[in-house]
Structures are given as C-alpha cells and as structure tokens.
Image (spheres, rainbow, N blue to C red):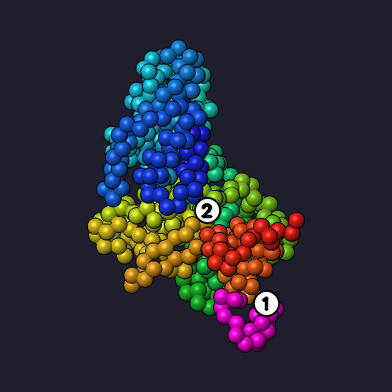
Amino acid sequence: MTRLGYAAGVRDAHLSMKQHPDFETAELITSGGVFHALQGTARAVRRKVELDLPSKHCYLEFEWRNSIEDEGHGAIHDHQLSESCWMEIGYSSGFLSTCIGGDIVVREIQCGAQGASECICVARFSHEWDDVSNDLKYLDPGYLSELATRRPTIPTESHPAPVSTSEETSAADSGRVLIGRSGTFDAVLQQVRRVGKTTATVLLLGESGVGKTALAMHIHESSERREMPFVEVNCAAIPESLLESELFGVEKGAFTGASASRSGRFEEAHGGTLFLDEIGLLPPAAQGKLLRVLQNQKYERLGSNRTQQADVRLIAATNNDLGTAVRAGSFRSDLFYRINVFPITVPPLRSRLGDLPLLIDHLVSTFCERYRRTPKGLTPNAYRAMLHYDWPGNIRELENVIERAVILADDGEALDVRHLFTSDAQFRGIGLHWLDERGKLVGRETNSTETSKEPLAPEATAWFEAAIQQPGHSLEQIEQAVVMATLRAYDGNLIKTAQHLGVTRAQIDYRIKKWGVDPKLLASS
Ligand SMILES: [Zn+2]
C-alpha cells in the first residue's frame, strides 16, 4: 500500500507541476499539492512548514483528520497498530520527493488508529531522520518478494531482517546507478533478483545508456559466481578481424602479429560471468563460433588444436531489435534462440521520470564528493527542466549533465539550467527560459515532442519561395498566413494548432487577438 501510494504521489506531483508551471516549490507543496490531493482519503491540515532547499532542510508537519486508512486498518487490527496510514505515507513521500527533488521520507508520529483524534505526520529529507531503512524497506521491491515467499508460521511481531534498499545496490564503480522506485524500474529489479541466483543466460534489452552494464554486474554479484571474474566485452568496440582472438584467445604464430599466446575473454571469465554488450553487432563469423560454444561448451584458441572447456554464465545486451535483425538475416536465428532465454527489457529514463528525484540527489552528491565541490543545491527551474527533458541518452546522459553542472557551478552557487543544458535543449510542455553564460535570455517553448527539427521538405520550401516572389510581404504576413492555414486545418482548435507549430497556446492566442481573428469562425461545422 505504501508503494501504491508512492506511485500515485509521484504521478500527482507531475500533474500539479504541469498545471502550475510558474509555482515555486513551496507554493506547489502548500497551496495545491499534497494537502489538496489528500482530501479524498483524509482531511489534511498544515501545521508547520520549514523548507530551505539549498541547505537541504525540510520540516513539514501536517495533520490528517478522518483518515480512511485509520478507520479501515484500525478496525481490522483492533486498534493495536502503531501507525496505519500506509497509503497516505507513501503518497506524501512520493509527492513531496517529486516536487522538492530529493529523497523525502514521511513518518506518522501519531496515528488515529491508536485512538488519537487525528494523525500527525512529519516530512523531512531522508538524511534528516535518524535511520530510514525501516521506512524505505516498504518502497523496496526486494522486501515485497521476500514477503511473498515468507512462510506464514513466522510470528508477525518478529521484524524481518533489514533488506538492502535499492540505493545500496548502486553500482558505484561502473558509475551507472541502479536507483529507482517507479513501477517500471521495480519490475526490472524483480526480474533481475529472480534470475540472478540462477545460471540462466540473460538478454538485456534497451536503449543505450539505460544502465545495462550496471544490471549485468548486479546479476553477477547476486549469483553464486560473485567471487569469480566478471568480464565485459563490447562487441561494437572491437574490430571484426580481432573479435575472435579477443573472445577465444590466440596461440603464438596463429597469424601475423600474434607474437605471443594470449587467453581470450571466455578463458578469463572461466567460472564467472561473461557480459557481451552490443551483441546485435557481432559479425556473422563470430556469431557462428559463439553459437558453437553455447551449444557444447567447447572452444579453441585461434591457431590451436587444444579444445578447452567453457564455463561461463552468459549475459548479453543489445539496443537493436534482434527479432528484426533475424528476419533481415543479419543475426542468426539459432543464436538468437540460444541467448533469448531470459530477456529483460530495461525502460528508458523518460518512461520512469518518477525516479529522477532520487537519481539526481544521488548523482549530485556523488559528483560533489568526487570533485570536492559544494554547490548550493539545485534551483527549482533546473529541477523542473530535468523533469521536462526527454533524456535520449538516458542515465548516462543524466550523469554527464550533472557531472558537467557540478564542475561548472561555483561553490555556494545553486545548480541552474544554464549549468545543465545548452541553449538549444528542448523541453516538453513548459515555457522555460534561463540566462546563458553571457547573461542572455534563452530557452524554448514547445508543446510537442513531435515538432520536427529538420528543415522543411523541398516542396514546402519551393512554395514559400514562390510566395515571396510577389513584392512587399512582411514576415508577419507570412506568419499570419501559416498560422491561419494551420488553424483552418484544425477547425480553429488553438491547442492543436500550437502543438502542430511547436509553440505555446498563449503564443497563438496572442497573435490571433492581435490580428482580430475569431477562431470559432474557422471551425468547419
Ligand atoms: Zn494514521
């Protein structure tokens, strides 16, 4: 229930931010936001608000009156519970973490389920509480799977052993992080936990930068082979002619340049895990050899007759659609079926934006520590820009963006949009402007991600060229013609027109008022 609430809170926070793009963080939380949104399940009353984002201080105290959860759970458990508003705790944690852009943990310090007239809650940054492992375990998918497998004979008072939270599993060495509480990401972690203990071949699918390497390491570390080597091969990074010797090793004199015998990655990974990244780009000859090893666990070094026994757990990853590659004949179908034993699709960052606050929080402190920088938090505008950006390069891009910003910002200065993004970055649905390095106001307003950045098609360009052959057209007249044509095409619908032209509704509104156009008259019916 806590997790369910958390997910709902994240979603509602995104909605609120969309509805009130001009609100500061504090306004978002207090005026609309959490107090308003909780009305359905409890009557929320604000008691105390202390919020200082740059120094990462948060103390919000609020009451819930007539909580549905108190009544429900309280009655079932005969009012023996210490706290019972699980969904509301989750909801406000998710909502506040998303609005504030940090890891906010909400605790119920008095609950109506014990007979009090109202519940009292306090929200603080996780680092401001003593030990939050107990709070966080309810947000951790590992705890859920443990609950599901726990035998009913265990008395309910006994506290389960603390389960590592997602945060602790971050693969710090690889620089890529496995952090997240969103449903989509949890689903991935659940699958990883499940398959990790086995020796099954795993196929990780997903765009580049989503953290496939970190997941592969995590699978290795949760397997019984964790003491043995983890060997990574990026199939795209090795020239085709060297790939086989790289994988299987080479005997001295096998070809010109093979001046010494050398083991391959299969040999290095013996007893451990071999991670083949970008397997979709494996050349056909290497595909055949790999298939043979997978079929009978045997291989030879290049130029050697001595057959060696392979003992590796294979994890493969690709951002190509292997099914299509098989149909196109560029990837062997028999190899595809061999490696497609346990496919896990890793979602792109833009489909798990609810995880951004935690990721940002983690990365900012990681890079501050690494570069010994002390920037003063993140501006609300910077945070909002990150929430409205599409992240085509996924987690890797997020890491790069934050690393760069931490280096660029002066100590004591808050990280702002200009530290994070260049002036041509595109954001979804918000009018976002900021000052660039030279103090110039920059920024884009787009309502649509579908607006193409490509130049116009030749026919369209030719049409415009013909139109301006006639003398005396001002830019505004041409603009008016384009806007009016678009409006007519959408029956006078301002929102669709704005989306089509990649501007805001307000910009269209402003223009047609200036031109004295009534959009209702443009509707065809
Ligand atoms: Zn309560």
- Residue found at the very far top of the displayed protein: 78
Q: Label for residue 337?
A: none
Question: Which residue is located at x 47 percent, y 38 percent?
Answer: 9
What residue is disc 1 on? 460
The structure residue drawn at horizontal position 38% and vertical position 44%, both measured from the top left corner, is 27
Under tag 1, what secondary structure? helix
Residue 172 point in image, percent of width and height? 38, 51
- The location of residue 242, given as percent across then percent down, is 54, 70
Q: Which residue is mark 2?
A: 350
From which residue to which does the magenta span run?
458-478
Q: Is residue 463 above or below residue 114?
A: below
- Looking at the image, the residue that sits furthest to the front is 516
Looking at the rendered structure, the kind of residue marked 1 is Ala
What x and y, as percent, mark residue 333? 71, 57
Query: In front here: 343 or 426?
Result: 426
Mark pair 1, 2: CA separation: 33 Å
- Neighbourhood count class around disc 1 (C-alpha, 10 Å): few under 14, some 14–19, many 20 upward: few
How many numbered circles does the render carry?
2
Magenta span includes 227: no
Q: 257 or 456: nearer the eye?
A: 456
213 is higher (above) or lower (below) than 60: below
- Residue 54 in view, yes or no: yes
112 sits left or right of 255 in the view: left
x 63%, y 75%: residue: 456
Q: Which corner quadrant of the image does residue 407 belong to? A: bottom left
Q: Is residue 464 magenta?
A: yes
Instruction: Please state which of residues 222 and 453 is positioned toward the viewer in this rendering.
Output: 453
Q: Main secondary structure of the magenta part?
A: helix
* Picture quadrant of residue 48: top left
Looking at the rendered structure, the secondary structure element under dot 2 is helix
Front position among marks 1 and 2: 1
